[in-house]
Amino acid sequence: LKRQLDLVWSQNGAGGFPWLTGVGWDGHIFDPSMQGRYTPQADVMQLNF
């Protein structure tokens, strides 16, 4: 059974550092700051395990 973990990083964090704004799995992402949609300021890192 393969699972996919999604980590959503925002690029406009404090001090210019990326910060974690959302998490998800198998393509279902929970991110309150994005209202359920991708934004140009966010990068999604997918980890397969």
Image (cartoon, rainbow, N blue to C red):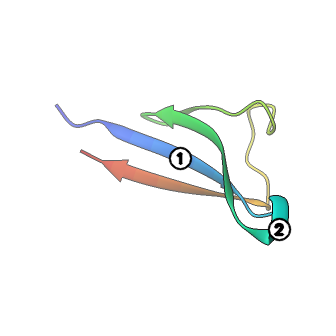
Residue with the most extreme front position: 15
Residue 44: image location, x then y, percent: 58, 54
Residue at left 75%, top 64%?
11
Q: Secondary structure at mark 2?
A: helix
In this rendering, the label closer to the viewer, 2 or 1: 2
Amino acid type for the residue under numbered disc 1 = Leu
Say which residue label 2 marks: 15
Q: Which mark is residue 19?
A: none
Based on the displayed image, in which of its 4 quarters is residue 12 positioned?
bottom right
Dot 1 alpha-carbon crowd within 10 angstroms: few under 14, some 14 to 19, many 20 or more: many
Please indicate whether residue 30 sits to the left or right of residue 13 in the image: left
Instruction: Tell me what residue is drawn at x 80 percent, y 70 percent.
Output: 16
In whole angstroms, how far apart are the C-alphas of marks 2 and 1? 20 Å
Image quarter in which the C terminus is found? top left
Circle nearer the N terminus (2, 1): 1
Dot 1: element: strand
Residue occupying the far left of the picture: 1
Residue 49 located left or right of residue 41: left
Q: Quadrant of the N terminus?
A: top left
Query: Looking at the picture, how far across and down is residue 3, in whole percent?
Result: 29, 36
**Residue 19 x, y percent position in the rendering:** 68, 54
Residue picked out by circle 1:
7
Q: From the viewer's perspective, is residue 28 above or below residue 40?
A: above
**Mark 2: which amino acid?**
Gly
